[in-house]
Amino acid sequence: MKNDLLEFIDQSPTPYQGVVEIEKRLKAQGYLACPLDQDFQCTEVGKFYAKSPGAIFAFELGRKKPWETGFALVASHLDSPCLRVKPNPHIKKKNYIQINTEVYGGPLLYTWFDKPLTLAGKVYYQEEGQVREKLVHSQKALTIIPSLAIHMNRGTNEKFAPNPQEDLLPIFVDLEENLQDPLFGFLEEELGIKSQDLLDFDLFVLPLEKSSSIGLKEELISAPRMDNLASAHASLQGLFQAKPGDKSKFLAFLNHEEIGSLTEEGASGNLSYEILERIVYALGGTKEEFYQALHKSFLLSADLAHAVHPAHLECADPSNQPLMGKGPVIKLAANRSYVSTGYTSAVIEALCRKHDIPYQKFVNASDRKGGSTLGPLMQHSLTIPGVDVGTPILAMHSNRELGAWVDQINYEKLFKVFLED
């Protein structure tokens, strides 16, 4: 399991590569494609998937119709905070060429300085009068964001407030001053696309360093993008391990959670609703039976949680303090920024007790504002009760996050028993 998760994270630098990686694993397990622009052929018990460029959905049809049993749903997301490359990306200053970027999501900015960085995403180009696309994920240390020396900024340890437009532009060093457009030159060499044929791109600056285990007994996970690829991987493994049953299983791996989910591939989009509806119709159901299926369904909204930080105990709620190594977390909030209620939490707590899965609870300290996640946004269109769950980690939204292997193991087990119970 350990190497598989680390490989999954390293092979999924952006949602585009994440979709490819998940599709590869689904195909290896016998899942059949249902193209979104064609009639769904899932007319009987079987394993299927549907995808868009940055989101993918896996579903296994149960022995009974969805309107008889409902769906067991798990939703996670494939995007993570990073830096997005802007159009016309080159900025020349002295013998440096900087890459013009904008912040994607809410990264912990100081963790992006002085580390080898690379590029990944998707490139669009013209070939024979058609718009083509290619994925790119460089394994080279292409660029870096250097800090300003403390001798020139004596107060930096007391107050660090980088200007995103000035301080977060990765550099190519050109000591001989003969580079013109190094990013385009790199793409031409890496992908075999002539610069004049390049049309556009969706490119992101990302950490190069590989994921790893750390600790005296390698009991911890140190990796970029744990939020939320750790949830995506655990739910996918849970799906593969779950036994077939009467109820249909449905996994949504969504995009754009870190920027609010207000897109066609995000939790607020209509894609999950559309695919669930098309499944019911393909099985011979009606609109009324689709609504019945929704009201018999249950959702696990899977996104990682905050562990108590040993240096900042004051940031945690006094009586709800998740610890790494003590199990998955049920997340609750009075303002319903999480979907969990007393009743739905009790359902998952009972499931955990039945299968000896340790669990914890997270609530924000009342003097601190917390975030939200997929579940409440999905409920805009899907009237499905649910619970927000995640494993506890430290350094969320850092260039490199920290979790515990035992929590990941129990997280995977939770998805397995939820999907088959």
Image (cartoon, rainbow, N blue to C red):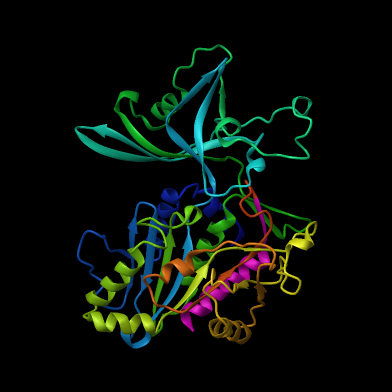
Work out whether residue 290 or residue 30 is closer to the camera in this orientation and state it: 290
409 to the left or right of 191: right
- Which secondary structure is most common in the magenta stretch? helix
In which quadrant is the N terminus drawn? bottom right
Which residue: 57% across, 81% down? 345
**Magenta residues, as a range?**
401-421
226 to the left or right of 12: right
Height in image: 89 above or below 361? above
Among all residues in the image, which is located at the extreme front?
Answer: 367
Which residue: 30% across, 78% down? 45
Q: Is residue 420 magenta?
A: yes
Residue 255 pos. (x, y %): 43, 56
Residue 48 pos. (x, y %): 33, 68
Which residue: 26% across, 60% down? 36
Height in image: 17 above or below 150? below
Q: Is residue 124 magenta?
A: no
Residue 69 pos. (x, y %): 37, 86
Which residue: 61% across, 62% down? 370
Residue 56 pos. (x, y %): 38, 60
